[in-house]
Image: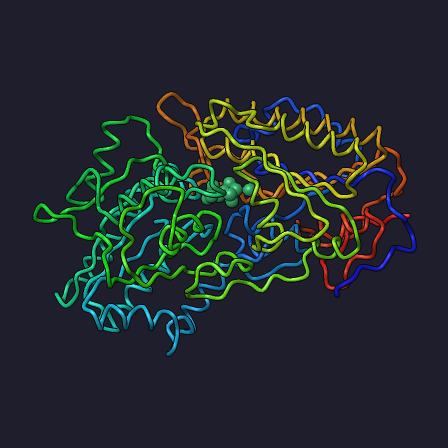
Amino acid sequence: MIELKKSKNFAGSEGPVVLVIMDGIGIGKNPESDFVKQAKTPNLTWLHENALYTELRAHGVAVGLPDDGDMGNSEVGHNAIGCGRIFEQGAALVGKAIASGAMYADGSVWQELVSNVNHKASTLHFIGLFSDGNVHSNLNHLESMLRKAKEQGVKKARIHALIDGRDVPPTSALDYVERFDAFLKEINADGTVDYCVASGGGRMNITMDRYDANWDMVKRGWATHVKAEGRTFASMKEAVETFRVENPGILDQDLPAFVIERDRAPVGPIVDGDSVIFFNFRGDRSLEITKAFEADELKEFDRGPKPDVLYAGMMQYDGDLGVPARYLVTPPAIDRTMSEYLSNAGVKQLAISETQKYGHMTYFFNGNNSGKFPTETWKEIPSDVCPFEDAPRMKADEITDVVVQAIESGEYKFIRLNFPNGDMVGHTGVVNAVKLAVEAVDENVGRIMEALKKANGIMVCTADHGNADDMCELDKKTGALVLDEQGRCKPKTAHSLNPVPGIVYDPSGAANARLADVPEAGIANLAATCITLLGFEPPEDYAASLVKVG
Ligand SMILES: O=C(O)[C@H](O)COP(=O)(O)O
Ligand SMILES: [Mn+2]
Ligand SMILES: [Mn+2]
């Protein structure tokens, strides 16, 4: 059994250690674009001036992504915070498996899927996020797989494209469509294969729901991709252009579903004998559609007859459940998480968020495993199903009610929570709502500070990556703000590359905490920080604690 040693310097505080993850609240660089700065945040300002405060890296290689041009995201962020080390993540692992050829090796799942369609003269389908955001997927991976499929004799491939606009600029769909159309033209040119787009829709409208928040999305996705039911178009370009004319101002992520037809028939329903690859590597938004393809019985919606297909995910999405059964690339081997160590030490832990980020605090935090350790309690506050720009407080008040009660009860020694507001509202691009979202988080951080003052506990407050701190598009070449016709900044919906705050607030001063000299500190250093503040020595191979105590 893996164990923590008690610290010689500090026996732990009287009250709990509370880890607050303010999702998507980073430290901005451009005041015009920084809606954390523009919001009223008396508590965060006070903490900046009076508590221990440092900046932490939350993007690129500091969280296991291929390079520093990659923005951080919730999966890699919560993995790093919960596991205290930097693991090479999905984006990097898939890229390497493709480059080395390991993904396509003899005996691989890829070979099994390709042999299936070659043997049966059936269709190889690819469903996934049509993006190069490197958060859930990468179009390079799709193109590489299609090239390999052609090389290996696959005659017919169909692509079901989930339009992004959330990890990439909000209305950039046609850039990707153009690039992919050129790719398809080239690959189809010699007439030996028939590869084309068969269906799709905005990623926040179909297929990519998470944490059981809204299964209707998956139901719509199933009807679109599998049954080829829905509004038909001659091409994806025509679909996107038509929807934009009909819904002025619509963001790509919200585009309706579409089905592509040729000679008055849909080009790519998914039928018995086909092979299907869900090419997203990230699990949260892949698990529900995977269940729809794999489960013998499905209670969440009536899917009709389930086609008998060979289904594979790009990665294994849940290590504990072993889902999906077939996957192309092995995920990072994240072991010895902070939750496991604390459980073995008998530390009672509470993990809480609302539905939209619930799995971030449980499944992602525990290294993409859905199992619970013995001393953990998990609490989910149901999220509303509504546009979050209309309700920017989301469930921050309700989450805090439970946290304050948990602090007062003395039942838990470690409490971890996620406030989704800065991120979920940041993704809508509605900047006035983003301000309100940040203000809701600040107020609730204040309530937690008050409760900890009374209980003699300690708060560690941070974020998994930025978003609300950088809400305007910048010109790629000049770096200047992109303005619309009215001179307003053009909203950006994706995460930022900015650092995030690392705050330690110890109102009783019991820990005598001071900042340690940690070069290039990142959010992976937070696990050792929490363990130190709980009165233990962090494991030797964890990224160092940000504080010294005692
Ligand atoms: O899935 C999403 O909503 C976005 O692609 C990334 O946001 P998250 O990493 O904060 O969940
Ligand atoms: Mn996040
Ligand atoms: Mn996000």
Between 79 and 47, which is closer to the camera in this rendering?
Answer: 79
Q: How many labels does the image show?
A: 0
Residue at the left extreme?
263
Residue at point 79%, 33% (across, down): 409
Residue at the bottom extreme?
106
Question: Could you say where residue 465 lies in the image, as x and y percent from the top left?
Answer: 58, 43
Q: What's the coloring here? A: rainbow
Q: Is 92 placed above or below 137 here?
A: below
Residue at point 41%, 60% (across, down): 314
- The answer to whether 539 appears left or right of 168 in the picture is right
Between 214 and 95, which is closer to the camera in this rendering?
Answer: 214
Q: Is 47 placed above or below 66 here?
A: above
Q: Is 494 placed above or below 523 here?
A: above
Residue 538: image quadrant is bottom right
Question: Could you say where residue 298 lies in the image, as x and y percent from the top left?
Answer: 39, 48
- The answer to whether 465 appears left or right of 258 in the picture is right
Residue at point 18%, 68% (across, down): 121
Question: Could you say where residue 143 lies in the image, as x and y percent from the top left?
Answer: 31, 60
Residue 167: image quadrant is top left
Task: Tell me the quadrant of the picture where the N terminus can be found.
Answer: bottom right
Question: Could you say where residue 179 lies in the image, as x and y percent from the top left?
Answer: 27, 51
Residue 175: image quadrant is top left
- The answer to whether 464 appears left or right of 46 in the picture is left
